[in-house]
Amino acid sequence: MAQPPLIAGRKLVPTSTLDLAKYPFTPQAADHVQKLDLKITELDSPEYSRIVERAKKRIEESILYALVSDQTRNDEIEILSFPIAVMMVAAANDPFLKRRYALAEAKRAYNILKQENRQKLTEVAQVFEWKIKPVKADADALMPQATIADFTIHFTNYLKNTGGFHESKWKLVNRAMLNGEVYLTKDEAARLLAEEVRSHLEEKLNIKIDITLPHTIVEEAEKLKQLFLSRKGKIRQEEMPKETTIEAFPPCIRQLYNMAQTGHHISHIGRFALTSFLINSGMPVENVIECFRPASDFSERMTRYQVEHIAGGRGSRTKYIPPRCDTLRTHGVCPGMDEICRKVRHPLAYYRRKLRIIKAQAPTPAASA
Amino acid sequence: MSVNKIQTQEFIQQKFAEYYKQNYDSIQPPTSLEKREFAFLLFKERTMLRHKGFKTSEDFKNFLQSVTPSDVYYSSAYYEKPEEEMDAKAWIGADLIFDIDADHIPTPCKKQHDTWTCKNCATSGHGAKPEKCPKCTGQKFEDVSWPCDICLGSAKEETINLIDVLEKDFGLSQRVMNLAFSGHRGYHVHIESEAIRTLDSIARKEIVDYMLGLGLEPALQGFEKETGPRLEDSGWRGRIAKGTYEFLLSATQEQLENAGLKKKTAVQILQQRERILESWKEKGPWKTLRGVGPDGWQKIIRKSIEKQSVRIDTVVTTDIHRLIRLTNTLHGETGFKKIEVSMGEIERFDPFKSAVAFKHGTVVVAVSDAPQFRLNDNIYGPYKNQRIELPTAVAMLLLCKGAAKIAEETVYVQ
């Protein structure tokens, strides 16, 4: 089977089939699969049924539990079912399912990795070309004081895999870092490595490959997609209401909004945050432009151009969303947090949450009657 | 535009053209020339000519000669197609850039040399521009900021701190760092390294937060109940200790209270200075200091983080499409050149000598208003409505700043 390796990195040694079953996303596992000369066009034949079953199971588990189980009883099935599951998810072609499947496989990898010894974890990390070193507990004279750590990784590897994490312990400023190396416990290293697996797998799922899967397999993939969509409906976020509710603005946007209303100067990033927030809260472009009118240097033409650009009506046609809370903090736009701020990471998440609260407090028609 | 103003602008551009002609060899385009976007601020139109790309060093230099812009920039980013619109450029990566600008550092001298003028009613004043004009409540100002020894000295100090963190914490060698004086109010540190090139904006924001100490949780950097970091610790732990050391031993009662401490606590701290100093020989003052509760400690730590943070421009570093001034080109607001500073020389580096681009001749100018300033080893000004013959570099600074015009009878002799 002409399956390109997931990643082209260094060799994972030694490569027992057990290791390949644990880490089916490595190039070594892909090599192994290639040698078996699997016929994709014959995937619907009975000899492959157990493998296809496991592939289906992998996807199903990801949909239902956001976690692929760790079944290492039959290594060959485990190894082969992975690329097939990947092809099926790619064929189903739903961006949310792709994301969920990648996440579930990454969680599986995390659960296995955190139980490995340092040597093995290092080897897997090196497959992804990480600069990683096991820390010798008491022999590391350079190690920052009172740090408990099993590994150091280069700060670029660290930053590339913590972008989506929001707990303050993951912020670089809160880590022990010396000479470009960030100190990590084994559990943390496994977590970051799982994140690496997730992003690589997601990338892989988005590559268009020209493979024709047998009809029945495509049907199976379609069924799984339907299962996913029916589940997704339950967790779908509420739609934004049509009217913008100023009372539900987070402190940062409220301050920017007041500044605009009173004609104060607003920084570039502040203007971007306010405009994109208002657009996303459902305010029509015309009304957003009006917000900026009190400024002494107001130019309708310039403002319209910028607002329409942010609303996705010009240039790249992308509709922009406001920056995240921590970005606003970095650039000095955050005026300080309130209770709700502590629970969210994005101004729009604040807005949705506050809207729910306002709605819950409002007297219902029955009560007011 | 008055005839005089046009003459002045033409004079500046003529001098710039001479500079670019005479320094043809010393102006080198950046690495990976064909993957960079170039931008030029034009003298006459005052618009930015963007999305330019060049294949060879000669193409670039010849363009520079033929256009003579007031400012020359190139992208910190590498693109597959640098000449396309932003969306079609195909971003490959970007160098990591730090900008330390005296504008971000409060210095007392700004009151003396910086001025603003309301665009609406022409009211003017000294120091940083106000939010609203005190006379007409207008909000648009023409502000003139002057580079001065104190401002640039503090920017230099921040730059030294920045390099220290980049080396010790981030493990970056001086080999990959390029340090330069911007030609106006600060310093640039430019890092070209394969490992860093593909970091996205979110990752770079984490680097910025690290420099600022933003989001730092003292509990995660060794500060717990009755224990804290030591002076010799590395990274932010050591910096918290150093900041605390400095603050507790040097702050006045007023400064302690300004940090949010109660008057009683501030007085108690002042009385215990001997003990505090002594405590650093052991485990630090965390346990021994009397009269400071957990809340008080939080405030002290906040202040120590503030003291140790490196005041960089947050936008420049997080922007992965940033345009940056090219080394050895002229700064349109000063007539100085952006100049590389070798790492070992920074302490001794004198921007008011090294960045001087126009070294010969004199020019007669009519100065309207300028504070006192230094260039090379001489002090000039303050000037107020006077006609004076000055060395070319001095005249250029005044002309570029808009503080002077070419004197009408001046016949420029080469």
Image: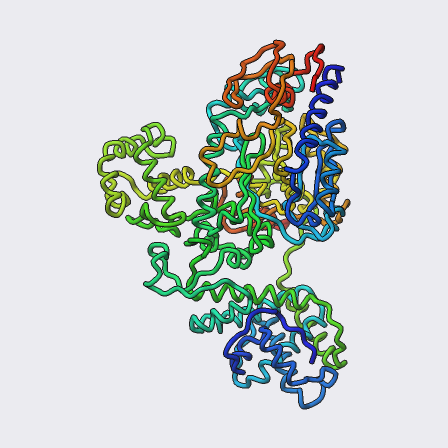
Q: Quadrant of residue A138?
A: bottom left
B302 or B152, nearer to the observer? B152
Q: Quadrant of residue A331?
A: top right
Residue A46 in sight? yes
Is B241 above or below relative to B413?
below
Residue B203 appears at what percent x and percent y?
55, 52
The residue depicted at 63 percent of the width and 30 percent of the height is: B331
Residue B215 appears at what percent x and percent y?
47, 46
Residue extending furthest bottom? A47
Residue B12 appears at what percent x and percent y?
69, 23
Q: Is residue A111 left or right of residue A280?
A: left
A317 or B349, nearer to the observer? B349
Quarter of the picture containing the N terminus of chain A is: bottom right
- Count the labels in the image: 0
Q: Is residue A97 left or right of residue B112?
A: right
Q: Is residue B104 left or right of residue A46?
A: left
Residue A361 in sight? no
Residue A216 appears at what percent x and percent y?
74, 82
What colour scheme was applied to this rendering of the protein? rainbow
Is A38 above or below relative to B17?
below
A248 or A307, nearer to the observer? A307
